[in-house]
Image: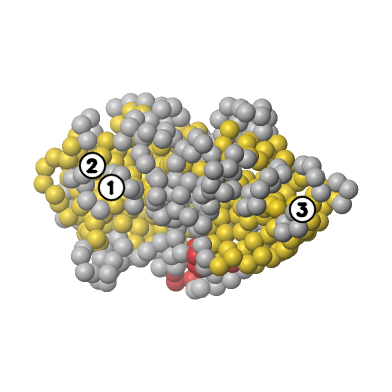
Amino acid sequence: MTVTATNPVLPGCFPDPSVIRVGQDYYLACSSFAYFPGVPLHHSRDLVNWRPIGHAVDRADQLDLGGVRASGGLYAPTLRHAAGRFHLVCTLVGGLGTSGNFLVSADDPAGDWSDPVWLPEAPGFDPSLFFDDDGSAYLLGTRELPGTGGRTEVWMRGFDVATGKLTGPDRVLFRGALVDARWAEGPHLYRHDGWYVLLLAEGGTEYEHAVTVARSRQVEGPYENHPGNPVLTHRHLGLGYPLSGVGHADLVQTPGGDWYALLLASRMYGGRYANLGRETHLARVEWEQGWPVFNPGVGLLTEQTEVALPAHPWPAADPVDHFDTEALDTGWNLLRGAAADAYSLTERPGHLRLRLLPQTLAEQSTPAFVGRRQQHIDFAAETALDFTPGAPGEAAGLAVLQAPGYHITLLVTAAADGGTVVRLTERNAGTDTVRGELPLGPGPLRLAVRTDGQDYTFSCSQSPEGSRDVGTVDGRFLSSQVAGGFTGVYLGPYATGPAGGTGHADYDWFRYGPA
C-alpha cells in the first residue's frame, strides 16, 4: 500500500525539521525562534499526514525568551529516541538569561518535557544527538571559525545523556563539502551498511542552500567527502524556479526498510518572495554505493511523493476556533513568552480576551498578540470583535506580522473627532503608513483579511453597512527576502493601549482557511 504526499507536508513556517520513528509512529520537531510555546512537535503514521501534539518548550519556567530579537530564540532542534525516552537538543540564541545549547527529555513527546539541561561545554549552534548501535551516545554541533566569514566546522564529543555531560576528546568531523564551503551546519549522523553517514546543510538557508554528505567507517572519522556533492539543491535551477532554499534534511527509515527525508524549502511567489517562510517537504531516498540519493532519477523536490506506507489521515481540524477551551489551541503562538497577563480564555467564557498592553509589535517585547502561521498563498481569515476604545491610543483588531519593522494592522481605535474608526496601517522598514480608514458605529463587528497572491485585502463588516473593504496592501515586504530573518508570516488578534490602562478586547471566534 502507498500514500501520496503533496509538498509541503507541513505548510507554513515549520523550518529545520528533525524526524524519528518509534515503532509505527513518526515524530517531527521544528524551529520556532521567538515564538512561544517553542519547538512545535507533530505526529504521523504515514509521513504524509501530520497532527500537532504540542511543544517541547511550553512552560514559562523552562527558559526565558524575553527580549530576544525577531528570528532569535530557538534554532534547529534535533529529536532522537533511545532506551524508551525522547531527547531533544536545541540552541537558544539571544536570550537575556542563559543562552546556548540545551537538552530536554520526555517519556511521551505529547506530554511534559523536562527543564533544560544547559550544555556550556557545547560550543556553537545546531546540536545533534547520535546513538550508536553499542549504546554509546555522541553530541555533534557546529561552530564558526573566527574571521572566516561563515566558514564552520562540525565537531563531536561523547555524551552522557543522563547527566548532560560531554565526555572524551573534541573531534572535528567535517568542514564542508566544497573548497570555499560556507555555513556547513545542521549535522545529523546515521549508521547505514557499515558506514557512519554525516548529513549536512550547507550554503546558507537561502538560494544557495544545499544538502551535502560525508562518510566514514569509524564514528570518529576521518570522513570522506562525497564526490557528487551536493546531493540535493535547487540553486542550479535558476532564480525563476518557484521552490528555493532546499536543505537541512533529516532521514528516517520505515519498518519496511524504505528511506525518506524531511527537509525545508521555500515557495516563491509574486517574484522571489517567500511569505510563508521555510516549510517542511518530503523526499524519497535510496542508497547507492553507500551514499544517499534524493528522489532518484529526478534529483530535486517534487510536488508529489509516493510513500510506501498505508495512508493514515487524522480528523480534519476545525477551521474555526470558538475559544471555548481553557488553553489556547496548539496552533496559536505568543511572542517571547507565556504572557499570562496578555490574554484570558475564562474571564468571558467562549471568548479570547486580550488586555490593552502598552507593548506593541514594533518592540522586542511580549505584546497582546495571539498569532498563527500563514499556511496558504491564498487564504481567508476572519474574526468577530467586541471592542470600544475608551481612551486615545487604545486599539484592537488584527495583525499580519513578519517582524517588528514589517507588519500590517487593522485596528479599531478612537478617531480625532471622538468617534470610532477602523484603520489599516502598513509598517514597512519601521515607517508607518495609513492605507485605509473607515468610520464605525457602536457594537460588535467582524474583521477579515484575504490574500490573492501578494495582495492582502482587509475588510470589516458591521450592520447595517455590511462588508466593506478598508484597503489592499502589497505584501512582498512581509517576506524574509525584504525584512530579513528566518520566519514566515503570522496573523491573529492584537490589542494595545497606553500604560496604566485597564481596557480589553474580546474575540468571539477566529476562522482561517484556504481562500
Q: Residues within 10 Å of mark 2 (few under 14, many from 20)?
A: some
Q: Position of residue 489 (x, y in %)?
A: 56, 55
Tell me the distance, in whole angstroms, between the alpha carbons under discs 3 and 1: 50 Å
Residue depicted at x 14% and y 49%: 170
Residue depicted at x 66% and y 27%: 349
Say which of 79 and 38 sits in front.
Answer: 38
Q: Are marks 2 and 1 in contact (CB under 8 Å)?
A: yes
Kind of residue sitting beneath label 3: Gly
Left-right relation of 230 to 243: left
- Label 1's element? strand
- Label 3's element? loop
Residue depicted at x 46% and y 38%: 338
Q: How crowded is mark 3: few (under 14 residues within 10 Å), some or many (20 or more)?
A: few
Classify 11 as above or below 56: below
Residue depicted at x 36% and y 35%: 62
Mark 2 or mark 1: name the one nearer the start of the chain.
1
Q: Is residue 89 shown to the viewer in this render?
A: yes
Kind of residue sitting beneath label 2: Leu
Q: Is residue 302 shown to the viewer in this render?
A: no
Display colour scheme: secondary structure
Kind of residue sitting beneath label 1: Gly
Which mark, residue 119? 2
Q: Label 3 belongs to which residue?
A: 419
Tell me the distance, in whole angstroms, between the alpha carbons under discs 2 and 3: 56 Å
